[in-house]
Image (cartoon, helix red, strand yellow):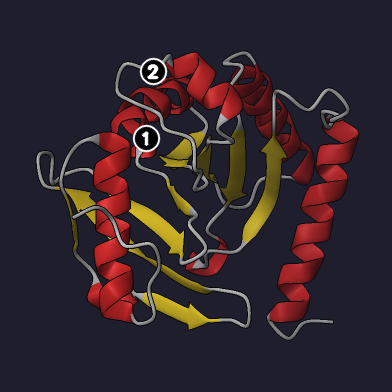
Amino acid sequence: MGPLSSFGNIEEAQKYLLEQLNSKYGEEFEIIKYDKDDYEEYPTKNVYSTTVISKENPEYEFWAWTANSGETKDNYAASFFASQAETIGRNVCAKKDYLVDYKVKLQAPITDKKWSRDSDFEKYMSESGAYNRIDSTMQTGMPIEQYADQIYDLLNSLYETNTGFELRVDNKVENTNELIFMYNYDPNNEQLIKPDKERIIEIIESELRTNKVLNGGE
């Protein structure tokens, strides 16, 4: 029997999703987090999303979404491209002595396109919308201009990788997780203006004002 043509409840949705993924990738999958299932009924269609793993490679955990109108999307490719992508960001951060700490995590939107392990990595990073989220920590108590110098240097090194990234910077003031800088970069966006040091200072000052307001300051 082939895949269901539609579904009307969560049990049918789960079966439908797994059959669609099997048809798309030619392997078996398993839903692993029922507590994070999301089943919604809308006037035009029912939709379902959940966390899935590959039975063949259970370390490959990803998000999948489907609708009873016939659409199915997932970010399975992030599972097998994550190591290669995250290494790019880590290699940059590892060379920056001014970083107290950092972590890199590949973020990938769900898509109906099939990416396989044999797909070209650079093409995947360029066309899928995937990017590295980089959470970094700099020293506490430096002048804003010094933060700007370090952030400017870090950004320039990340640009050279020609991969998308979201850079988040904090300085752990009073052991909080408040940011002093955040910036998103898409190498395919030709209209994107890279911030100079003056603009970086403006962003830092804005973040610090926001943090002060959130903490009850004036």
Q: Are marks 1 and 2 in contact (CB under 8 Å)?
A: yes
Read off the residue under disc 2: 119
Q: Is residue 19 left or right of residue 146?
A: left
Helix, strand or loop under label 2: loop
Q: Residue 77, labelled with which disc?
A: 1
Local crowd size for mark 1, using a 10 Å CA cut-off: few (<14), some (14–19), many (≥20): many
Residue 112 on image: x %, y %: 49, 43
User: Which quarter of the figure is the N terminus placed in?
Assistant: bottom left
Q: Give the amino acid type for the residue marked by disc 1 in the picture.
A: Ala
Instruction: Indicate left or right for 118 with 145 as reference.
Output: left
Judged from the image, the secondary structure of the residue bearing numbered disc 1 is: helix
32 versus 20 height, above or below: below
Residue 9 appears in which quarter of the rendering? bottom left
Relative depth, front residue between 116 and 79: 116
Q: Position of residue 61 (x, y in %)?
A: 26, 49
Disc nearer the start of the sequence (1/2): 1
* Residue farthest along the left direction in this orientation: 56
Q: Quadrant of the C terminus?
A: bottom right
For marks 1 and 2, give the CA distance. 9 Å
